[in-house]
Amino acid sequence: MNPSGAVARIRAALPDQQARRWFRAPGRVNLIGDHTDYSGGFVLPLAIDRSCALAVHSAENVRVRSLDARDVVEVPADGSAEPRSVRPAWGRYVAGVVRELATLGRPPAGMDAVVASDVPLGAGLASSAALEVACAVALSSLAEWDPGIPALAEACRVAEETATGVPCGIMDQLASLAGRIGHALLIDCRSLERRPVALPEALGILVVHSGVSRSLDASPYAERRRECEQLARELGVPSLRDATAEQVATHPLGRHVVSENMRVLAAAEALAQGDLRSLGSLVNASHASLANDFGVSTPELDALVHVLVDAGAYGARLTGAGFGGCIVAVCDMGAAEAIAELATARYRGRTRREPTPFLCRAMDGAGPLNAPFAS
């Protein structure tokens, strides 16, 4: 395989690369189904061909050197470090993973690791989940211990919540662990049941960074979740997953969650039928709901959706939590490059922001990275 940018940078930085074991965890793009996972709803993400990579060998403690942040974190392998006290701040993700795995019963095997990532930061493509999952699969492998994908995903989700204080859902970690090449994953975030949905060869998945980064701990994300939970209590249901359209008709947040769950199921069916125009219509409706009912879009994201659809995409929507980051557009594969070129030029002229487009492929989930030295 050709090494990713992350792997190539680690190779260049390591004199002892042949003595190390290698692992990777992909980022994800969510085709449809945002702000539904923490209500136990449905999502339709895919693991993408941008990953966080680790080169490791056994050690007494857990020591991770980041080529991106250009510093090092070191914590005890037994999970005794308090994640929120760890410096530098990105090390809190590592410490959170170590602690949560210890809670699950992982033996305290340490590692010395070098990490690099080509998942864009602050883009809504699950860069933090990729780091958590890469560390988790490496630590589990070194300890010869396997709790299973659902437990590992939940441990990584809790680690992120501990590290940031943001009460995130489980989509990112589960998609990074369970991705399947050539497929999206229809995930039931209550049962954690996963169904691969084949992506038609004609489908192009175009991701465009808006040029506006975002940080969930500085956004209203946690407030939205609290409001959804409060609404569920008022309606007398376990979560908004259980509400009906009639119950939430006058509640914008509830309207989004209930209608988005229906759109996710319909989108999975459209993919299975190869009906890209119907898929595009659902994607467009999802963005409108996120913008108008859930209030997580921005003028830049709205503008980028508009120019992508105007340039010929079947549909476009914000992906991830919103408040900045990326748009995902579904289009004809043969037209993707032309759509990207036209849309980004128009967006740049309207907003004076610099967009970054790239086509995504659906990849397998996290695990060992074999033969990273091949050219």
Image: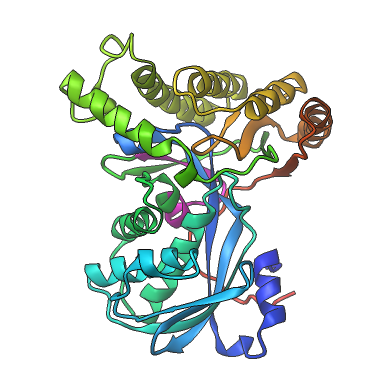
Residue range in magenta is 175-188
Q: Position of residue 327 (x, y in %)?
A: 63, 34
Q: Quick check: is 144 in the magenta stretch?
A: no
Q: Residue at x 59, y 60 (%)?
A: 51
Q: Tell me which corner region of the image, top left, top right, bottom left or bottom right, holds residue 330.
A: top right
Q: Quick check: is 183 in the magenta stretch?
A: yes
- Viewer can see residue 4: no
Q: Quadrant of the N terminus?
A: bottom right
Number of numbered tags placed on the structure image? 0
Q: Residue at x 43, y 89 (%)?
A: 59
* Image height of 132 relative to 356, above or below: below
Q: Position of residue 69 (x, y in %)?
A: 61, 67
Q: Tell me which corner region of the image, top left, top right, bottom left or bottom right, holds residue 230.
A: top left
In this rendered view, identify the residue nearer to me: 317 or 175.
Answer: 317
* Image height of 127 relative to 272, above or below: below
Q: Position of residue 74 (x, y in %)?
A: 44, 79
Q: Quadrant of the C terminus?
A: bottom right
* Image height of 122 relative to 152, above or below: above
Q: Tell me which corner region of the image, top left, top right, bottom left or bottom right, holds residue 309.
A: top right
Q: Position of residue 13 (x, y in %)?
A: 69, 81
- Viewer can see residue 228: yes
Judge left or right: residue 34 versus residue 78. right
* Image height of 250 relative to 371, above or below: above
In this rendered view, identify the residue nearer to me: 364 or 86.
Answer: 86
